[in-house]
Image (tube, rainbow, N blue to C red):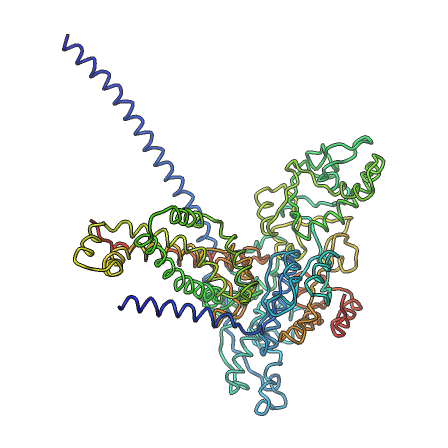
Amino acid sequence: MTDSSASNSRQKRDFGLKRRYAAERRFRLFGQAAIGVGLFFLAALLFTVFSKGYTAFGQTSLNLDITFDAQLIDKNNARATDPDVLLTPNYAVLARDALAMKLGLGKLSSKDRKLVDGIISNGTKVQLRDMVMANPAIIGTTQNIWILAEADIDSANKGQIDLSVDEKRRKVSDRQLEWMAQLKADGTLAQRFNFGLFRNGASSRPEMAGLGAAMIGSLYMMLIVLVLALPIGVAASIYLEEFAPKNRFTDIIEVNINNLAAVPSIVFGLLGLALFINFAGLPRSASLVGGLVLTLMTLPTIIIATRAALKAVPPSIRSAALGIGASRMQMVFHHVLPLAAPGVLTGTIIGLAQALGETAPLLLIGMVAFITDAPVTPLDPATALPVQIFMWANEAERAFVERTSGAIIVLLMFLAVMNITAILLRKHFERRW
Amino acid sequence: MKTERILTVLSSALILSAATVSNAAARDQVQVAGSSTVLPYAKIVAENFGETFPKFKTPVVESGGSSAGLKEFCKGVGSDTIDVANSSRAIKQSEVEACKANGVDEIIEVKIGYDGIVFATDIDGPNLAIEPIDLYKALAAKIVVGGTLVDNPNKTWDEVNPAFPKWDIAAYIPGEKHGTREVFEEKVLKIGCESAGGLEARLAAGMAKKDAERDCMAVRKDGRAVDIDGDYTETLARIEANKTGLGVFGLSFYGNNADKLKVATVGGIVPSTETIASGQYPVSRPLYFYVKKAHIGVIPGLKEYVEYFTSDEMVGPDSPLADYGLVAAPDEEREATRQNVMDGKIM
């Protein structure tokens, strides 16, 4: 009797155990599937970006012996009295002549001239002019320099243009392809590392377009966010967490901060337009305004992270500090805040990384713009890294496809560095209780 | 106490920096905003302008659309408002009035040239010869069948015109916020509607002329005509994904991607800068920009920028803009534009 009832209850228990094990196995499987899907999409994203973008870090260039012909540049020898005469000559002719000589072409027919011009970047004339302006002594000499190739030649060299289609349908002609092969064979035409991508501002000529201006704009904005959001956010959280009385009013503030963290960023852009540009009269497109808008956007993130970090400091630390006679302010600044610092830093860096990748609020304050000159002060017109990606993605020229992906790689690198810093800082300073 | 002092210094530094910043100096740089169609041209001009006139800063060109640009333009006069609005359509009367209400009563209109709108399929597609009536029959919401107006029953292109391939109808047309959409409606659907007898049928059904015309231009909403709200790059991606789709592009975009797309003739004419300049190719539109006269002489470089933009060096038949795909206006028209700019003739 006792025996059978015991075995009976064991049977019942076994049945339940089996079902619960099965449920657990299913749950693990779902979890692994979820992670698998996530990893698959991440891998697909990284693969497309890197496979399309790595070519952007090399740029097809031409190594030419360019003669700075005094006849063409300064016929009347007036540069000593009036340096501005050096601004106007047609410097493009110098590069064209040098290339034609390299190709062994004699006097160019007008059709050939167009084809030869089509190999050289349109920006070469500025490059040569700047060389002459910087050092007029080179007039009359021959210099060996690297100049950029036209974007279409670059795309053809990288195999991004379908050369099997009819000649009329592509931007590079058969004649130019022949020349390219010839120049490649004698080492005139080669791929070089694309420093311009990090140095130049935006350009309508793909081969000259770079992220330089956008990176400086982003840097200014990050500095402004850091300088404003960190002290304000930390001060607000310390007050709310350590000093403020817990009542209805502070509850409402807390709910509002949590809500603000979820507000779409474009709303902050609208606010910035109304408050900073229309009301305060700050200049459009300036990184200062962008930084202020992103500060508003980042504040809730920092406040929430800081409050969580402060909460995680055990009350015994506070009691001990107060117990040996510290004031509340001393307790906070000497004991609680240093212990909460790793959490605050992590929250700040994650907030900054979020702000770095933001475009929507910048649209309304005029930062989605074509800007060639790198900003000198935060009041100069500037743009940001993600904005540059957006603008390049909409360009018609083939050469901008690789640049778009290249810029994404650069942005991802920045984000990765910031997030890794956050992890390392946390690892280094974190204390377990 | 140390921390207290740090806090005081920090907060006073913040207040100080905010105070100095609010006395921002006047602008020394031209600011342009508006149409995404005009953007590539304005960029080329701005860049060349900056290189040709080293004493001026390179103008800042924002994108965002014709309407958004004109709205920003009409906000008022002063260095905190933009100087030039690019537009892929003429300014509307309502916009002129909005401008006036904010004190912008002197506007100079500058026509920079023409832009063609082309229809293209994947490079491996057949050679298509399209008439406006075909596009109307394929894409309109309601067409005439057997004398009565019915919801568009056509499912494949060969039902529209037996000369077309037996492809499911899938057309990627610009979304309603684009200036290009208006041209597509006016120059293709409306004309197709008239020649298909759709307009007559609507008038006969008792519609007022204006309503009938608007109804003619309504595009079917059953998913066969897809609105593209992004740029032409998105349309191109759709064509690459669906090889039997038909896309609407700007001529300059097609010119840059001719190794991926095959262009259709409209009315038997192949779109090119020549056929558009001569007016043979029917689907084209003028491009404009608008300048605040009050800013000329105040913003450094604005006058020079406008003069440089209208010079033959930029918008002539053998200019960088023409190379990019702008259809240059006829000689007399360009000359007249330059004269207007010189005289500062306002609208």
In the displayed structure, B18 sits above or below B231; it is below
In the displayed structure, B161 sits above or below B40; it is above
Position of residue A275 measured from the top left corner of the image (x, y, whole percent): 53, 60
Q: Is residue B110 left or right of residue A411?
A: right
**Residue A417 visible in image:** no
Is A356 in front, or is A282?
A282
Residue at the spot 22% in from the left edge and 15% down from the top edge:
A11
Is A333 in front, or is A87?
A333
Q: How many marks?
A: 0
Q: Residue furthest bottom?
A: A81
Position of residue B92 measured from the top left corner of the image (x, y, whole percent): 73, 56
The image quadrant where one finds the N terminus of chain B is bottom left
- Quadrant of res A298: bottom left
Q: Is residue B16 left or right of residue A344?
A: right
The image quadrant where one finds the C terminus of chain B is bottom right
Position of residue B184 measured from the top left corner of the image (x, y, whole percent): 72, 49
Is B51 in front, or is B104?
B104
Is B208 in front, or is A184?
B208
In the displayed structure, A20 sits above or below A164; it is above
Residue at the spot 72% in from the left edge and 37% down from the top edge:
B141
